[in-house]
Every structure is written in structure tokens, then in C-alpha cells.
Amino acid sequence: MTDINQILINASKFGEEARKILGTSIETSVNKLDFDIGILTATDEEFNSVVELLDECKELNEDLNDATIYYQGSISTANGIKKIILPYPISMGVEAVVSTTSKMLTQFKLKYLFMVGICAGNKNISNIGDIIIAEKSLNYNEIVEVQKQDKETKKKFRQNADSIDKNLKSRLSLFSKQIDLITIKSEYENHSDFVKPLKCHIGLMVSGSSLLRSDIKIKEINEDYHGIKGMDMETNGFYFTSAHSLKDSKPKFVSIKSVSDFGDSTNHKLSGEERKNYALYTSSKILFEFILYHVK
């Protein structure tokens, strides 16, 4: 009996600690709210680009004991109506996305978890507005620094990538080849401002804590990590948390972002606002086209 009492005491302490860490109750972790799709964003603009495409989007009226504000909506697809949950973004960066992703996995039962928004692109292969589907992601700040006898410090970049589900990758690959990018671009109000054709890339997205505007840093990243498609501040935190938090019944996840700059000192003809708005349009439009026809 003493052993059982001690187990109950320990369980109670664990519950209190879990509530402090997650900002949620143990009950909601067990009795998750049922949604088909969760969509994460990092900024107000990204959030609004998603809300505009949802049906009947409104604030979730549930007492979750959670500081995050959630919105719920739906979208009518070829496979029926899909219920969507959308947290209002806390801020940009890995800390915010890890916190929000953890709570999404804890609070809600999801089939899919998407991230959508803008990123920096690899200027050698991409144009402004191009869509980057992150097959895998790693943290470019994850390095080992070794000081040699001559006092020179050598950096060793680690290659700890997290990847999306293989079946989902195949679906996204087929989708990227079938999607009518010409029509999607033509439907954008200011499409004539963007001369180059719209393209879709699948591959490596690298993430770091810096908002990059550095030729030197971009050169260093491209030299140490091969095949980079895009760079942002959130995708790796989103992938790591999604891949490693749940043992069973984890949702399929992917980050779909569009290029608004190249992370360097490139002089663009269009303003940052014009480029950002186009990238917001193409990323959210591509995500919803995928949901419409390929999410079952």
C-alpha cells in the first residue's frame, strides 16, 4: 500500500509540473479536441493569409487553460468538409514555434499539421514567390567549434535533419508537378509585377535564430549544407517537435513557405511589402490547393 501511495503522490507532482510547463491541464491532454488539420503561422500577416481562405473562421470557445488564442474554421474539399484549428502566432522564431507546436500536439487530435508563410530562398535556383516545400529541415546554428593549437577555431556543422512522412512526400511531389502554377500566378492582383514564372521546389529548409540579411552568412550556409532550397526561423523547430513529441498517433506534418527575399543584400526592384504580399499569397494558395484535393 505504501508503494501505491507513493506512486499517487509522484503522479500528482508530475501533473502539477506538467501544468506549469505546458500551460494546460492533464485532462485536455487525454481528451483532445478533434480537428482534421492544424495550421501554424509565425506572423500576423501569415495568419491573416490563412484566415482569408477559411470558411466561418472564429475564435475557439473552449476553456483550455492556455495562453494561446485559437481560431477554428473549415474548408470544403473534394474529400468532404475539413475542420481546421489555427493558433494566433506568439512571435517569430524557434522558441515560439516549439511552444505552439507542443501545445497543438497536446491539446488537439490532428491528422495533419501544416506550417505556412514566407522564407528566404536560394537565389541560385529560386525566384520571388516560388514555393518551398520542406522535405527535411535542420538547424544551421547547430555546430561544434574546435580550437586548434594555433588558436584557429574550426567549425564543424552538424547534419541532424528531421524529415516529413515518405508517403506525404510522394503526394506533395505529385502535387507539385500537377498544380497549375501559371493560373495561380495569373490570379494574383499584381501578377504583372513578377516577370519570372512561378515554380515549386521540394527539398532542404534550414532554420536559424537570425533574420538573415548577410552575404557572408548566406555564403557560409550554402558552402556547408548542400541542396538548400530555403531558409527561415521556424521550420526546424516545428519539425523537431512534431517528429519527437508523440509516440503514437502523430499527425503528418510539412512546412510550405514562399520566397520573399534571399537573405542577402540583393537590391530588389520591388519593395519588401510587395514581395512579402506575393509570397504570402502563393504559400497560402498552394497549401489550400493541396488540402482541397489531396487531404483525405
Image: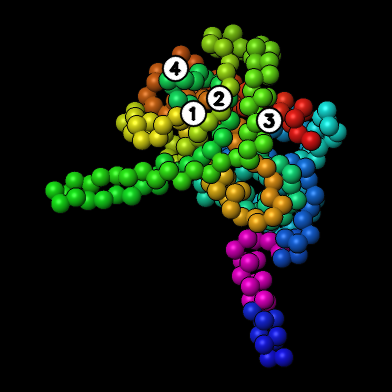
Write down the residue under mark 3: 171
Magenta portion: prevailing SS class = helix
- Of the image marks 3 and 2, the number of the one nearer the N terminus: 3
Q: Amino acid at mark 3?
A: Arg
Instruction: Provide residue 231's location: percent of width, then percent of height.
Output: 47, 33
Tell me the SS state at disc 2. Answer: strand
Q: Amino acid at mark 1?
A: Lys
- Give the left or right position of residue 15, taking residue 241 as reference: right
Q: Inspect this view and state whether residue 18 appears.
A: yes
Kindly indicate whether the residue at mark 1 contacts the one at mark 2 (C-beta within 8 angstroms).
yes
- Residue at left offset 59%, top offset 63%: 21
What span is colored magenta in the figure? 11-25
Q: Inspect this view and state whether residue 85 appears.
A: no
* Foreground pick, 203 / 18: 203
- Name the disc covering residue 268, or none: 4
On screen, residue 267 above or below 22: above
- Of the image marks 4 and 2, the number of the one nearer the N terminus: 2
Quarter of the N terminus within the rendering = bottom right
Whether residue 47 is in magenta: the answer is no
Q: CA distance from mark 3 to mark 2?
A: 14 Å
* Foreground pick, 274 / 32: 32
Tell me the SS state at disc 4. Answer: loop
- Give the left or right position of residue 11, taking residue 122 as reference: right
Q: Amino acid at mark 2?
A: His
| Image quadrant where residue 226 sits | top left
- Name the disc covering residue 229, or none: 1
